[in-house]
Image (spheres, rainbow, N blue to C red):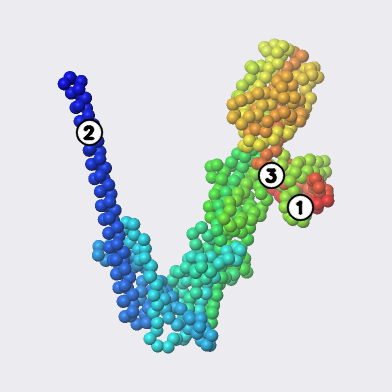
Amino acid sequence: MSLFEKNKDRGSSLIDVIFSITIVAFLFGAIYLVYFSLYGAIANIQVRNDATAVLNQQIETMRNMPYANIGTVGGIPAGTIPPQQSIRYDNNNFMLATDIMNVEDPAGQSFGEPTGTVDYKTAQFTISCPSCQNFNSLSLTTTFAPPGLQSTLGQGSLFVNVFDSNGNGIPNVNVTVLNPTITPAVNLTDTTNDSGTLQLVGVPTSTQGYQIFVSKAGYSSAQTYPVGASGNPNPSQPNITVAQQQLSTASFAIDRTSPLAVLASNNVCAGIAGTGFSISGSKLIGTNPNVLKFATTSITNGSGTSLFPVMEWDTYTFALTSSSYDLLGTTPLTPLTINPSSSASFDFVLAPKIPKSLLITAADAATGAGVPGVTVTLSGGAFSQKLVAGKSSWTDSTWANGAYTTQSGGIDVDSVPGTMQLFANASGTYATSTPSWLISKTIDFGTSTANYISFSATPVAEPPSTGAGSAGFQLAANNDGATWNFTGPDGTSGSFYTASSTVANLNSDRYLRYKVFLSTQDSATSPYVNDVTIGFSSPCVPQVQVLFSSLSSGSYTIDATAPNYIEATSSVSVSSNAQSAQILLTHQ
């Protein structure tokens, strides 16, 4: 046999050995899994048997108790059974929950049986084993009948109804009933049935002694309140009275909660931290004086946001409490209605504080809804200004100390604060050759849907000796903050905006820069720029409100016009630093 054939045989033998070992390992693995599956199933059966034994022991113990003692501690009926107890049985730690209820047989009432008569009791047992693997809890319900005739002495019935905002009953709502004024005291928690009702029969009588709390995960909550309590002496829903042989009912409306995000930002969507505000709901829990169910104050975080993850369905009023800003408007208008199982946001749009400001809201006279795009003119004495809702402006007025992106080297921004002009040479004259240019810093309008409307700069007219077009401007916009193609109104780099222009052929993008070109034909005179203003609209600009600032005290006339509405006029007196007014418009 050759050496090659010998090596080949050895290689085949090694492969056979590895293959055999793999098969054996697979078989033993399968046997291992089957073994432990069977072991787990047998162990689970044993735990269930133990749990059943615990239940049987509990039932047998209660059957040998006096009927009057069959009840839970703090429950209705009151008794000696703990509602929750830990029981160790055969090395397993079980948790046993017991719920005992009085039952009034409806058939008895047809024969004149008084309300509150207890015909028998039901007990529901639920047992679980938190430390046991793969064990599902067991439940068992049984009844206990009285040894003789029923008794109604000192008893009535209490039905608790819980429904949603549409009036539909809500099942499985947690209902807690407290009454420390009777002996034994009542402290029970149970759940509503499929119809949203918890029926308690054989309830000891008590005048305004039963306080009720209802709650469910993901829902709002509700409760009754004691009469005469501090802060709410006259509750809308006082604690419940149970009278002998009478049915008392307590009804509560709850529904799924919703998250609310409150934002404070400027007109270019930049969040403003530390803004104080208040929120008040409209639901009352007391009258004389009115006590709101929800009222709070808050402050926005570092990003200008304040989150409220659990808000009840209600109509909420928002108010700015921070004194550092003027309110440009809100989106949407206040009050805001939050529906069940929804999400809501509210944005305070702010501007730096300027004394004597007036916020005007235009609303539909019939519906109260805001009128978008309204044009408002405020006039009084020598003052007259026109503003359009949904439109705002951004102004740049300083470029000193490098507050720009780059320049050609011929622009002077430091000699005269707040002014941009050509550099003068050592003899005090200006170059009359190639125009000099400067590119502004990036302006972030906060949204990719910003719509650029107008461009303006001051002064409107340059010195005549500098020549026509001595101050020209171009714009560039993008969404990546990196691609800057400067163009004029015809969309090319060969045209220029003047000091008062309508913006055209420019993308509605988030980021914008402007480019200033200065030149002169007179070596003794330079063109100059004091400020640059961009008019724009965006979702971050209030759509139905306008703010007038730097007003003088006195009387003003408000004139409002909007498409498809009749022109409206009203008057207002301005006397304080931050005022608001509403003008109502009627459809044509």
Whether residue 155 is visible: no
Determine the CA span between mark 2 and mark 3: 80 Å
Marks 2 and 3: which is nearer the front? 2
Point out the tag, 2 or 3, that comes first from the N-terminus: 2
What residue occupies the far front of the structure in this picture?
A: 1
Name the residue located 36 percent from the left edge and 71 percent from the top edge: 82
Label 1, secondary structure: give it: strand
**Does residue 385 appear to the left or right of 276 in the view shown?**
right
Element type where label 2 sits in the image = helix
545 up-or-down from 526: above or below: below
In the rendered image, the residue lying farthest to the left is 1
- Tell me if label 1 and label 3 are in contact, CB under 8 Å: no
Query: Badge 3, how many Cα within 10 Å: few under 14, some, many 20+?
Result: many
The picture places residue 140, in percent across and down from the top left corner, at 38, 70
Which residue position holds label 2? 16
In terms of depth relative to the viewer, which is nearer, 178 or 358?
A: 178
Q: Does residue 309 sit above or below 470 in this rendering? A: below
Q: Amino acid at mark 3?
A: Pro
When the figure is inspected, residue 269 is found, relative to residue 62, above or below; the finding is above
In terms of sequence position, does the residue under pointer 2 or pointer 1 come before the other? 2
For disc 1, the marked residue is 364
Give me the C-alpha separation between circle 1 and circle 3: 16 Å
- What x and y, as percent, mark residue 87? 30, 67
Can the viewer see residue 519 in this picture? Answer: yes
Residue tagged by mark 3?
542
State the SS at label 3. loop
Residue 368: give x, y in percent of width and height.
73, 55
